[in-house]
Image (spheres, coloured by chain):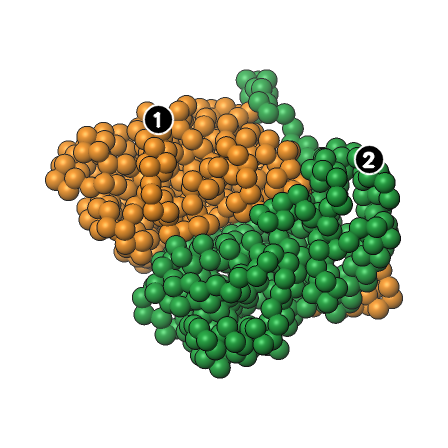
Chain colours: A green, B orange
Amino acid sequence: MSATEQTAVMPFGTLQPPRRYLFGPGPSMVHPRVYEALSKPIVGHLDPYFIQVMGDIQQFLKTAFGTQDGATLVISGTGSAGMEAAVANFVEPGTKFAIFANGYFSDRLTEMAKRHGANVVRFEKAWGETYTDDEAKEFIRREKPKVVGYVHAETSTGALQSGRTICDAAHEVGALVIGDCVTSLGGVPVEFDRTGIDIAYSCTQKGLSCPPGLSPMAMSQRAMEFLRARTIPSRSWYLDLKLIHDYSTVSHRYHHTAPISMFYALREALSVIAEEGIENRWERHRRCNKLFVKGVEGMGLSMHVPAEHRIATLNTVCVPAGVDEAKIRKHLLDGPGIEIAGGFGPLAGKVFRIGLMGPLATEDNVQFFLQEFNKALRAQGHSI
Amino acid sequence: MSATEQTAVMPFGTLQPPRRYLFGPGPSMVHPRVYEALSKPIVGHLDPYFIQVMGDIQQFLKTAFGTQDGATLVISGTGSAGMEAAVANFVEPGTKFAIFANGYFSDRLTEMAKRHGANVVRFEKAWGETYTDDEAKEFIRREKPKVVGYVHAETSTGALQSGRTICDAAHEVGALVIGDCVTSLGGVPVEFDRTGIDIAYSCTQKGLSCPPGLSPMAMSQRAMEFLRARTIPSRSWYLDLKLIHDYSTVSHRYHHTAPISMFYALREALSVIAEEGIENRWERHRRCNKLFVKGVEGMGLSMHVPAEHRIATLNTVCVPAGVDEAKIRKHLLDGPGIEIAGGFGPLAGKVFRIGLMGPLATEDNVQFFLQEFNKALRAQGHSI
């Protein structure tokens, strides 16, 4: 380094992120081993070692999604890129697409589908509600769509929608099913094969305890056949699943330069999960969820979603009357460095969204959170 | 950790990437400080600290792109996602799109534009050739397109296309210009404002010495006006530049969950560049390029592109008669762990593609490479 270079100024100072406890809906806390993986030296995107890393991830993902016959792969974009990949590849212009619309992410799915030229029909429900088996069947049998979309774990509301009946009814009428598993994968059972989902997409930054940046996907054999039979290419080249599947699984022919470091991170995150055992992990999240609900109910607060439809990893707690939820969030962030989220859309100001995912889903952490949450509510004048 | 968890198997072993010298066209060698940045604890995508990180990056990018008035932002996908963002936002269905087609990436641009419904006209040249001012003017004046696309530094051929006349002629007929700067940004001058580019996209894994995963973009005021005036939304929601610009620069309203760790890495990579000084960095690459060319010519080899049109950071060296380039590449990878690339398309088997970017662009590293390259050629029976 020359003398001039040594004295050059550093315009923006050192990168020194504050330490946060990520108790929000995601990104969630990252496992220390995943940070280590991120700092490993990269290889090329066509390097035999990287091909192996992609293969390992596809294997691990089969367990996480719960599929034996399905194809798994990873989109080089966040969960929303996975959503758009599902739409761009399986919803052709003019396709009738039936959406179970009970939250923000089914609205996003609707918006994407419309941009891709779909004929969207929606079954609207209030944010936080779910669909009974009879409702699901009746809607699908009446509409006879080509594609059905539902959100398994709705991040904006905290509601978990069972997919079994939706998939059965969809297959009866010959439709493919897109299941949004962004918030469920790695935290609560997805059971891709058992449920009968055809296309599932997720993210890395929630149940998998990895930073955001990639979108893992699973596709049934039925979905793969649809892809193979498709004659007009997807409107998106970057998200063309035929090309991505070929690069990552079949020929390993160059499509794009995959984000190597993020793939390292995802492999490590999945490896951590495999070591714990996915069932153990689900059980740990369930246990912490019960403890959490007991705690907030003990504080006189109530949950937005009925017990039988809650997502174990993402809790929507009703904001008590007279409390300004934004102030509580600011108090938690500025004080103990805890991030939680508020509601938005119809739930703006009405709920706190509190995640208990991965490394934070321990009894100690739940207690720590409840104490700080209690303090914050008191500090804002709420008597408990 | 419980006893069962401790004894759980680790199905795929430890992540232990081999150490590679990335002398290919990208990904290139990552600066050690960037790896450090990757392992810093993440914050949320709406955290005030992250908003600051995005702002810092936008500032740094102005210098790297060479723009004062242009808007800069980052796409949460690789360089190809940046390409698709340019097409999806500025090439509406039916738009006449004139493409200077002299390599693989102009073909990719063509493919994306067709999928987005454009009316593409191409000015074809052999891979490795460039366009004179007169040719550029004549093509644009004759075709009178709405959008013009060209590749500044063509990774598949090693040719650098000057954009000044293309941009002038395009503006004369009222067209916007998309410039592919994937291989140039950070390694050779882009000069966005001076050239008159309207939309430029790049990647992180070449001239910026950061792992792949993001696509930095710059847009002129003219491009921003077009975006604002657009009434039909882009077919891509994930790559909708109006929404991304709003999230990253204006309201910071949630669009998608940005890849936090990759943004840390990009900020650090840009900080390293700012400390060196972008002009010093270009000069360093130019110096190493001269040394490299002298070296390979001394070995009796010749360059595919004439001296005045070469990319300083990416060299295409002709494969000597009788040499199997795949064997040379394998020899280099299996032996010293050096990655270089071969040609493809019309240049398959005809060129080596050798990158000298970032940390590898030093005189020592050029010498090291030349020695190993020489050995590999001799080992394959080529007499020098």
Residue A179 position by quadrant: bottom right
Residue A55 as seen in the image, left or right of residue A252: right
Could you say where residue B375 lies in the image, as x and y percent from the top left?
46, 50
Residue drawn at 43 percent across, 75 percent down:
A144
Residue at disc 1, secondary structure: helix
Chain containing mark 1: B
Vertical placement of residue B347 versus B247, above or below:
below
Residue A126 as seen in the image, left or right of residue A322: left
Residue type indicated by callout 1: Asp
Residue drawn at 71 percent across, 53 percent down:
A316
Q: Look at the image and tell me in which quarter the N terminus of chain B lies.
A: bottom right
Residue type indicated by callout 2: Gly
Residue at disc 2, secondary structure: loop
Could you say where residue A238 lies in the image, as x and y percent from the top left?
42, 55
Residue A288 position by quadrant: bottom right
> Are marks 2 and 1 in one subunit?
no
Q: Which mark is residue A381?
A: 2
User: In terms of depth relative to the viewer, which is nearer, B211 or A18?
Assistant: A18
Residue B21 visible in this rendered orientation of the protein: no
Q: Are marks 2 and 1 in contact (CB under 8 Å)?
A: no
Could you say where residue A192 lies in the image, as x and y percent from the top left?
60, 72
Residue drawn at 31 percent across, 56 percent down:
B115
Query: Marks 2 and 1: which is nearer the front?
Result: 2
Vertical placement of residue A217 versus B181, above or below:
below
User: Circle 1 sits on which residue?
Assistant: B193
- Measure how far apart labels 2 and 1 are at the Cα level: 55 Å
